[in-house]
Amino acid sequence: MDFVTGGTLCVLLLLALMATGLQIGLAFILSGFLISTLLIGVDSALSLLGQAAYFSIATPTWTCIPLFTLMGAFAAYGGYAQRAYNGVYALARRLKGSLAIATCFGCAMFGLLSGSSIAATAIFGKMVFSEMQRIGYDKRLSTACIASAGTFASMIPPSMMMIIYAMFTQQSVGKLFAAGVIPGFITASVYSIYIIYAVKRNPRLAPEASKSSFTPEQRRKAVWNMWPVIIIAFAVLGGIYAGVFTPTEAAAVGAILTLVFGYFQGSIRKFSIVNTAMKESANTTAMLFLINIGALFYSRVLALTRLPTEMAMFLLNLNIPRVFIMLGILGIMFLLGMIMVPVGIYALTLPVVFPLVVRLGYDPIWFGVIALKLTEIGGVTPPVGLNIYAMKGVIPHEYSVSLEDIFSGVWPFVLCDIIVLVALFMFPQIATWLPNLLLG
């Protein structure tokens, strides 16, 4: 068997194993190991797997993943999401659809502390959905808004997927973090504009805006209570961009500050809460590391087969404008987002398309934002929209909301994401201006 044929079989075998429901990390390892055994023998395949398992993890950058995960867990138990939501709601209360708008920007603010879109969806689903139903919001708008806004935690730093993209492509984590800030908050703004338009067009989607707005003192107090979120985000991101901290050190500082503020505010004073947060972080980290080891081993096997190089050269030799090649890449990643988890998409596509993207002259930081925006869309589109399943899992039993209701409600928000994606494609400076300003 020649190596390119082996690479093709490796891709097909991975898709077949995933179709059986096998855990994604194990699917990467098994498909990569079987094909590498056929190509270079079992001893060399075991050696390659061992090297991938060690060298892909034995790097200081990976340490920030469990630390950022722990920071997000402390933030979840410390009530930071509630503070962010209340502060934004106090400012947006006079608008019709204000609960949904506050959810969008509340998720964006909470994304500054949590890199997990599923966690953000679950937390805001528990916190907001029942209140939305109590005052008369349409259930499709409510669930779709929460599930879609939860994806902001993937774009707005600190983002786990940005770190994983950096590992695959050897790009700067700090630049990627900076690149996600403006697109994340632009998406929240586009969502809010859609909500205002939709509610104005169909008043049955949301109740009338509250006439009894907050008193100035209540509004100031609600906004002031967001100070822990702002201070922690400033310490983490500002420390990275000022050159004071590495991403790993910033993650440690963020986790400590989140715990300390939670203690002094009275929300994290029991050791059982700290213990539970650490256990959850350990479980999440173990799952991520298994997926990452498998994904990186799989990408090494693909590189060994020279399939990515051959495909890149084939596409480069085609006499077509580079924009059509990029659109084809984006189309493939968009379709994969509907059936695969983000790490799987990165492992399957980045070894092939990233060298091609760079050779075509596109900015790798900009492409990271584009790739992440596509995985955000995949988080809410069927059949593997993980945020949808997270939202469904936290809906109280007394409310009759099906998966079909949630999936049918997300499409306007997907359209908003596509509008932002087109803007990023036409104006790359949206993603590249801030990292170039801060880090050169």
Image: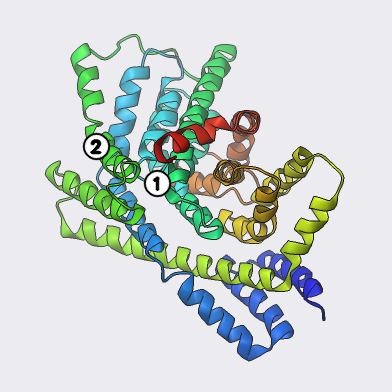
* Residue 82 location, quadrant: top left
Closest to the observer: 416 or 244? 244
Task: Name the residue at 58% across, 42% down.
Answer: 380
Q: Is residue 367 above or below residue 426?
A: below
Q: Residues within 10 Å of mark 2 (few under 14, many from 20)?
A: some
Task: Name the residue at 75% across, 71% down.
Answer: 7
Q: Is residue 304 above or below residue 433?
A: below
Q: Secondary structure at mark 1?
A: loop
Q: CA distance from mark 1 to mark 2?
A: 14 Å
Closest to the observer: 439 or 139? 439
Numbered label attached to residue 231: 2
Numbered label attached to residue 346: none
Amino acid type at circle 2 is Ile
Does 214 sit left or right of 200 as displayed? left
Task: Kindly indicate whether the residue at mark 2 contacts the one at mark 1 (C-beta within 8 angstroms).
Answer: no
* Residue 93 location, quadrant: top left
Q: Secondary structure at mark 2?
A: helix
Amino acid type at circle 1 is Pro
Does 18 sit left or right of 343 as displayed? right
Does 207 sit left or right of 270 as displayed? right
**Residue with the mark numbered 1:** 158
The percent coordinates of residue 294 (x first, y second) are: 56, 70
